[in-house]
Amino acid sequence: MIGPTLKQKIPTLRTVQPLAVAVLLVVPAFAHGQISNSATMQIAQVVALKASLSASEQKLSSNLVFASRRAQGKQLGAAASLTNPNVADATGMVPVVVRGTVSPELLKDIAVRGGRVDAIAPSNDRVEAAVPLAQLEGLAGRSDVGSVRERPHVRTNAGSLTTQGYVAHRAKPVVEGDQPVTGSGVKVGILSDSASAAGVAALKASGDLGPRTTVLAGQRGPANGTDEGTAMMEIVQDIAPNSQLFFATAFNSEASFANNIIALGAAGCTVVADDVSYSDEDPFQDSTVAQAVNKYVGTGGIYFSSAGNSGNVTNGNSSAWEGDFTDGGLISSGPIFNAEGRRVIVHDFGGGQTSNQLLQPTGVIDLFWADPLGGSRNDFDVFVLDNAGTTVKGSSTSVQNGTQDAYEEIASTDLGGNYTNPAAGDRIVIVRKGGSSIRAMHVEAFFGEVLAIGTSGATHGHNAGRNTQSMAATFWNSAHTGTKAFNGTHNPTEPFSSDGPRKIFFKTNGAAITPGNFRFSTNGGTTLQKPDFSGADGVTTRTPGFNPFFGTSAASPHGAGIAALIRSANPSLTNTQVHQILVNTALDNMAPGFDRDGGHGVLDATAAVLNALH
Amino acid sequence: MKTFKSFLPITGSLLIALCCSAAGSTLFETTTSLTPSDPIQRGRLSRNGIPQDWANTETFPGIINTDVIYHYRTFVLPSAALAPGRFVQISLDHLGPVQGTLFVSVYINSYEPNSAGGPNRGFDKNWIGDIGFSGNTFGVDPQFLEVLVPAGADLVVVVNNTDPNNVGVGQRFRLLVETFKDVLFTNPVQQAQ
């Protein structure tokens, strides 16, 4: 049924020409040469395709719609060039995220369809599964399924090495003092990509990891992992040498990551730290991992995470843009859109700039807006054009009509998406479907590549969650004085460290914090002061490949080690009290007082432990 | 901070003699640059991206560009100046203005480039480590390496330029040498000579 409908509604290039002329007339920004007529036509054709989707297809991400239609021999029109033929693996299975209400019936149906369930999020609203390509549309058609999309992409937040942080954070006087506090009695959990059997064994043998270091059963992480979790554990062991370390991977999948946070808590870890980000973590509401952090912190634990290495405004290298959607011109005045009854409006990034250039090539571009998870009724799409603004190189045009997340992702073809030949100078374009409301937006290059027009607010997701101790990074020798204690004043954050603050608009349950107000410009939602603290990076570890160990990935375990010292010094303290001690004793760095780059400042283990004891 | 008396002999080596008792880890610190009158070598160590550490992770990186002339300067720290554990950490802060044109390597007792045949031409004699990279990390973070100096051996820190035609000569850098008793960065006790 879809094929004939498409034939009727997808015009040939000739019929689209008048549209291009019309667009030129109504969109002044096009005169700047950012988006050419041909690119505008391609955008229009791809967007027009959305109106022809079946109800089931509307729950599939656009990339999966294209792949599904291609597999069924159905017409794709202009989207044909944006279809990745390799979405499914060699056996025809597609790894997906199914959002909705998880029940035994849903799980059984996935199995009946020849699929496989890999993980279920503790929030019971997300299943990670592998499903035959031909079964995607049918699965999406279930009433308990809100959306089906590709698996998100994952990163750790490391650049690349015992830690000089032992001196810089003043842990040494605590651990080696007359009344030593060593982390004894405290279990610390680490989540990262991997902790290989060989890597952990080697460090146990050299004394760099304690003999009781434990990897949860089956949770070492992928065999091709980098052992970054081992390096993180090594840092905690250096700071709090008698703490007992646990590891579980965060790299199997996002739901598995969330489950492992809970599992580390169940193993008795009262301090947990990670350094991982998933590309679909929502900036404006707690999603799967942040919800697991909330649950863990609710049991009394304290949770640390890397803020991210996505740059910041202070250094002019942000990989994120945040702000309200701004009308940059109507591009829906042609016959296609009249026929479709749709209008699409292009976003103005500021000063008439209707595109935002990538200054470095990126493999993943993500767009979020302020709608509740699983309930977005405002439809935005994202495109990436070439430098000249003449060719659409990638797109994400999923439907949002009430059951989906407010999320679009463009991935390069080698990462399963439709973005061909990513290059520096490519342009990000955001469009809004007519009738959709203005919302706060967040767009980013997921792996930290710099945008020409960047803003603050790079840190997001559970990395900047309300219950997360979000760690920025400062080089151990940032004062350029050698191995000395941090003093704050001379310890700027690393140029790549992700900045805050973090604006959120929804409570965990999806309820609006400020009903009816979902914009930055009208001070909607609430602002979380993130990151919280600064920790050391660029330190020496014994784990191969992490000498030195740069990135906020290294800062996170420094924070965890210091929290372990506090909990060891005074086990009766609540997690809220531990947090407050860290706030009270941090050494102010960057701008005076709390700031978006270094948070409350650089952690001071000696001051914190003394505070905990008195 | 320790204070030292130092002098620059005509050989291009800076011999550092301990003159006073002091506390703290800093053994030697200088801000300077290579000059055209510094000694020359043909060829240089390859930058393998691995800074030496106290676990002796790095192996000799090999040499390259044996037909190219580079300038170098040595900074000799006598064995008696080192803390009892002989754990040494060396930082190089590239002050520029051009980054990435200087390199640090560390030897014991003597530096003898081009003194032998074979693939390494003497660069490997007495070598105990190098810094692996050139230029401050991210343009701002000083590079560093760690070496464990054998008992009784003098420490020889070598700074050379890394590009032909004297590129790197004249670039300012700050060299900081710290000494510790152990792997936990324990400062040496008060010393006197």
Image (cartoon, rainbow, N blue to C red):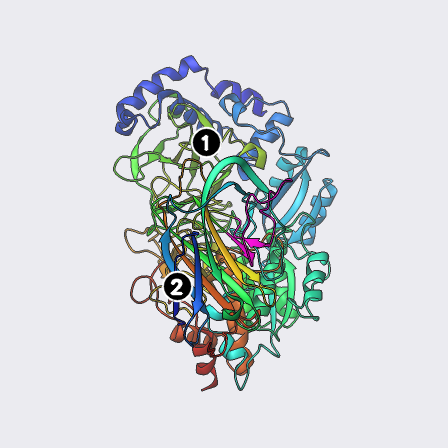
On the question of residue A534 being in view, the answer is no
Q: Is residue B143 above or below residue B89?
A: above
Quarter in which the N terminus of chain B is drawn: bottom left
Is A238 on the left-hand or right-hand side of A613?
right
Q: Secondary structure at mark 2?
A: strand
Label 2 is found on which chain of the structure?
B
**Magenta-drawn stretch, dominant element (helix, strand or loop):** loop
The spot of residue B2 in percent (x, y) is: 41, 72
Q: Which residue is at a point 58% across and 73% down the rendered structure image?
A: A270
Q: Which mark is residue A359?
A: none
Residue pointed to by mark 2: B6
Q: Which residue is at a point 52% across and 70% down the rendered structure image?
A: B80
Q: Amino acid at mark 1?
A: Ala
Question: Residues in magenta?
Answer: B105-132
Q: Secondary structure at mark 1?
A: loop
- Quadrant housing residue A490: bottom left
Q: Amino acid at mark 2?
A: Ser
On the question of residue B153 being in view, the answer is yes
Q: Is residue A141 above or below residue A613?
A: above
Is A339 on the left-hand or right-hand side of A462?
left
Q: Which residue is at a point 28% across and 29% down the rendered structure image?
A: A29
Q: Nearer the viewer, mark 1 or mark 2?
A: 2
Give the class, few, some or many, for how many residues have Cα within 10 Å of label 2's Cα (few <14, many ≥20). Answer: some
Residue pointed to by mark 1: A423
